[in-house]
Amino acid sequence: MGSGDTSYPIREIPFGSMGGLYDQDDVRAALEVLQAAAGAGGSFFPLPEEVDFQNAFARHEGAAKAVAVNSCGTALDLCMMALGVGPGDEVITTPLTFVCTATCALARGAEVVLADVDPETLCLDPDQVRRCMTGRTRAVIPVHFAGLAADCGAFERLARETGVAVVYDAAHAVSTRWRGESIGGFGQASCYSFQSNKNMTTLGEGGAVTTDDEEFAESVRRMKTFGYVYGKETRVVSVGFNYRMTKVQAAVGISQLRKIDRVVARRLEVFREMHRQLEGVEEIIRPAGIGPDHGCHLYVCRLDTGRVPFGRDAFLSTLKQKYRVSCGIHYPPVWTWDVLARRGYGEAAAGCPVAALAGNQVFSLPLFPQTTNEDCAYLAWALKQSLLETT
Ligand SMILES: Cc1ncc(COP(=O)(O)O)c(C=O)c1O
């Protein structure tokens, strides 16, 4: 590793502050709906925008159906409920994820089982999942980590052979593909996020469930709307909730979908440039799978702690204090959150050595569609300088 002769003026590169990529089309879409709804005879009832958005999103993600909801967290909750997951059941997932991928099972009274990740992709390893399966396994939740598809082929086989439901956490994965194929129709269902910093966003919050199973889609739809079945009279046929997306969000979602391919293509350009800039920096392990199938949501590097005499946190502190670069951590393993730690999930670390190590090495660079090649060069320089200067 050498930092070269170039030196740069310090620039502030925050993580996540750029948020979603809104343009005037989104603003117009929101305003039009708002004005029509607020005018005489208008209403905020989510139709027809909700249905139009669902159809467009299902098409984009290659699924028969999409159900719009208010977040990916609620999408996962609804899938667990629609599957009837409950006490006595086990749900297998990855430790390298946001906490709600695990708590959606705990919330149903089921147990979470943590299986290790693949050392290259950091996605849930299907072989490790098989090792963890018991007669009580009800569902598996792989995460398309950072926008890189989990091994959908292996999980489809596992579902066929064992009858266990696979629900993908696709929070990072709008536009992700697995071997060229859109991922929204794989497994029992996929759960997407449109929260602020995701590939597309619906005014800060939002989510969707996609599935090829029309009955499953109907269960999810019913439960997200109080258990309503519409007919001559509205009936309530099951327990339900209000997890709906608003009319204005759905209109913005339609507008965001019109440009998502362009946005993700731009993300790929930025990721490729960063990849190029970090070539040969042996202390930093670059993310796997950067290419046209990658959703390019997060650029997650690992500090190769075997090669340096300091830890990730000290390194990130230098990067922030001296070079004003903020990184994200995706993710501290879920067993570090109190809610799992106090249930004894810390013990799972011994069975998940890859995730345990990666949890101390990962850091996500502040890359967005707006990032320039100069930003990438600055980031690479700041990273190399921090490698030299951290003690
Ligand atoms: C992997 C993963 N799953 C689920 C979620 C939850 O998404 P939401 O904020 O839309 O509920 C997140 C949020 O960042 C996430 O990263």
Image (cartoon, rainbow, N blue to C red):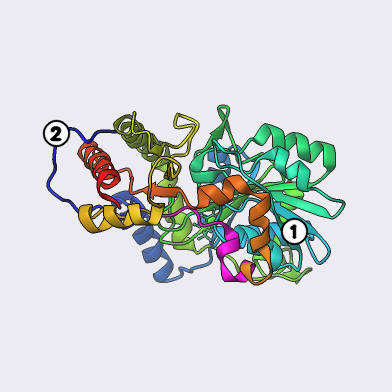
| Apparent side of residue 11 relative to residue 17 in the rendered image (left or right) | left
Helix, strand or loop at disc 1? helix
**Quarter assignment of residue 37:** bottom left
**Quarter assignment of residue 201:** bottom left
Q: Amino acid at mark 2?
A: Asp
* Residue in the image at 50% along x and 54% along y: 331
State the image coordinates of residue 336 (x, y, percent, origin top left).
56, 63
Which mark's residue is nearer the viewer, 1 or 2? 2
**Quarter assignment of residue 243:** bottom right
State how far apart marks 1 and 2 are (Cα).
Answer: 59 Å
Mark toward the start of the polypeptide (1 vs 2): 2
126 versus 32 height, above or below: above
Helix, strand or loop at disc 2? loop
* Residue in the image at 54% along x and 58% along y: 98
106 versus 179 height, above or below: below
Does residue 96 appear in the picture of this structure?
yes
Q: Is residue 329 magenta?
A: yes
State the image coordinates of residue 204 (x, y, percent, origin top left).
42, 61
- Which residue sits furthest right? 135
Q: Magenta span covers which residues? A: 328-340
- Closer to the camera in the image, 343 or 63: 343
Q: Is residue 156 magenta?
A: no
State the image coordinates of residue 177 (x, y, percent, origin top left).
54, 34
Residue highlighted by disc 1: 82
Residue highlighted by disc 2: 5
Q: Amino acid at mark 1?
A: Ala
Q: Residues within 10 Å of mark 2 (few under 14, many from 20)?
A: few
